[in-house]
Amino acid sequence: MALSLSGDEEEYDSEGEQQRAANRPKPKAGPSAAVKLPSNRSASGARRRRTRCRKCEACLRTECGECHFCKDMKKFGGPGRMKQSCIMRQCIAPVLPHTAVCVVCKEAGKEDTLEDEDDKFNFMLMECSICNEIVHPNCLKVSDASGVVNDELPNCWECPKCNHAGKSGKQKRGPGFKYASNLPGSLLREQKPAKEDAADATAATAAATAVSAARRRPERDETPRSRGEDPQPRPQPLAPLLPLPLPLLSPRPRPEDKLRKKRKLFDDDEEEELSGRKKEKCDEPYFSKLLHQIKTEEEDQDADEEEDGDEGRERRFRSGAETNGSLGDEAEPDDKDSRSALLHACVRAAAAVGDSDQSLCSSPRAGPSSEAGSETQERGPPRPKARRKRRLANRELSRELSRALNSEIQETENCLANENRQPLKVEPETENGETHRCCDKRLWTKIDLNRCTSITPLMLSGIIRRQPLALDLSWTNISKKQLSWLINRLPGLRVLRLSGCSWAAVSALCTSSCPLLCSLDVQWVEGLKDAQMRDLLSPPTDNRPGQLDNRCKLRNVRDLRLAGLDITDTSLRLICRQMASLSTLDLSYCNHINDQSVNLLTAAGTTTRDSLMDINLSVCNRVTDHSLTFFKRCGSICQIDLRFCKQVTRTACERFIAEMSVSVPFRLTEDKLLQKTC
DNA sequence: GTTAACGTTCCA
DNA sequence: TGGAACGTTAAC
């Protein structure tokens, strides 16, 4: 079959065969350089480069000016070599270019000209993620084959031909997935034990997917169904979900939303993880067990029986949502629909199948939904029918799985919402009586995940969407990759708390830029000693042209908390040198801190001498009365905490107060706790 | 023609 | 294996 190539793409294949020189400077690459197909790709055509949708939240943002890619841009003073989009602006749903045409009829997508939803699908351009061909499904004229719509990308599917040929689903991901791989879904892997099996991964995926679906679900329009639908017992009520990242309703419901044939329920954040779920791991044995059962039973099912049962079940899931959540009746639409979507997602994701309808909407705002017209499969003209894969048949199992997932989701959501001491369900009502959840930054200036035992991709994506000014990840098991991912996407972060985390994770600060950070808490970080402090405080090691920022990464930090660390004067020297704005310093429980350390901090010529306002030396057993004489040098000091310092006497504190009283009045608010009186 | 940036290649 | 480089595409 011919390809939908523009003229300059005709030579891709021949050029693509050429091997580039191994070393730079590379020879001038041919026109194929950017589009050469991977050698393992059984491609029959070149891939069309996708482009921004220009509608998604990311596309509508302005460049942050702070991220790695922004800094490379000429407009921000960089060399412009990397030529990548701002991290905050990476499109969630890259679309086919306007110039893309059907390889059969050579015409562009025509769905916008049609009213009927089936026709819309038939006449929209679909790009095969395996062979890359772009066709109108209607032009294939294959009625008995099956195409599997890829929910992860707009206008992407595995075409009937490739499906029929049994080509590998390994290449399911179409172009544009580099973004997905950067999203936090891919980060889950890092925090899971490698030995766990694939079934667990599927379950984890199901959980993430379910959340995703639940969150996405209300964004979509509802189509009342006239068919009789089996009542499905309502799932157990979920805890109210987090405010959604996107407006509840799309400005204009897109009819294409109902045309999806395969339901994977990917959220933008979980895409990567879900894509790779077969090999991924999960730390939830319960899910593993369930999935094992599900898979075993699934394989014993007769195909026809499965299909019937699944459709019925699908309708039942939808029924739950639609009965309760029509647009006009949205008192609690999000939760109800979300629950329905959640169940739907659980079953589908758990069984690693999906054939329900899915949106081909190019707008990521109308992301994957858990429901949409099964009627589109049941009526209308013959058209390539979505492939029906084997699915979960055991309803009880699916319910059980759903309950388990609900529980985890509730826990996750509670973690985020409760920890922020914010009501879970405070949603302003619109004039239409419809609730809106929002990610208004003003509502989420601080996100507190302190002691959350597990940082999930959902949490990470939730954090990014809310762009908090303060983030508390203390005593969590966050990984380096996760933290790095977060920091790079939180250019406005002011306060970061990593108390009790591992140095492995905290070391993400060595390579990531956090330019506005003014408060850093790395108390009790395991493994954080002088050498690590040096890494933390030293300028970026990247000295390539354009990377001119050789200042300390933490130069703007004013509040530094180092309690419980095995650091010595070596670190303090660096702090004095690099952190000119430091005003609050917590060195409590630092056993190596002594009078000489205080001498260093208050020595002539150091910035800390003048900037230091609040110092905590409690339980520093090597600090003696002598340190108090050093503090007399500090022009701004307001509080000196020497509580439980065995070698500091109350007498010395009182003497300090007496001597300072001439210029700055101090008092003892507690034993050995000196505070300036206002 | 210019600009933005996608997607591949290659290096550390 | 992740990230930088870069040719080329897509939009304007």
Image (cartoon, coloured by chain):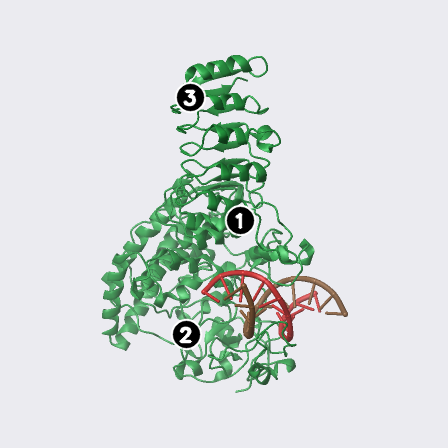
Chain colours: A green, B brown, C red
Relative to residue A661, is residue A611 depicted above or below?
Answer: below
Query: Quadrant location of residue A169?
Result: bottom left
User: On the picture, is A430 further left or further right than A355?
Assistant: right
Closer to the eye: label 3 or 1: 3
Relative to residue A664, is residue A187 depicted above or below?
Answer: below
Respond whether the residues carrying marks 3 and 2 are from the same subunit.
Answer: yes
Q: Earlier in the sequence, mark 3 or mark 1?
A: 1
Q: Secondary structure at mark 2?
A: helix
Question: Which amino acid type is shown beneath numbered disc 3?
Answer: Val
Respond whether the residues carrying marks 3 and 1 are from the same subunit.
Answer: yes
Q: Secondary structure at mark 1?
A: loop
Crowdedness of circle 2 by 10 Å Cα count: few (<14), some, many (20+)?
few
Question: Which amino acid type is shown beneath numbered disc 1?
Answer: Leu
**Residue farthest along the front direction in this orientation:** A596
Residue A550 position within the rendered picture, expressed as x and y whole percent measured from the top left: 62, 49
Residue A434 position within the rendered picture, expressed as x and y whole percent measured from the top left: 47, 48
Closer to the eye: label 3 or 2: 3
**Residue of label 3:** A648
Residue sitting at 53 percent across and 76 percent down?
A123
Cα gap from disc 1 to disc 2, whole angstroms = 33 Å
User: On the picture, is A237 further left or further right than A521?
Assistant: left
The answer to whether residue A319 is seen in the rendering is no
* Disc number for residue A490: 1
**Residue of label 2:** A170
Question: Which chain hosts label 3?
Answer: A
Question: Which chain hosts label 2?
Answer: A
Question: Which amino acid type is shown beneath numbered disc 2?
Answer: Lys
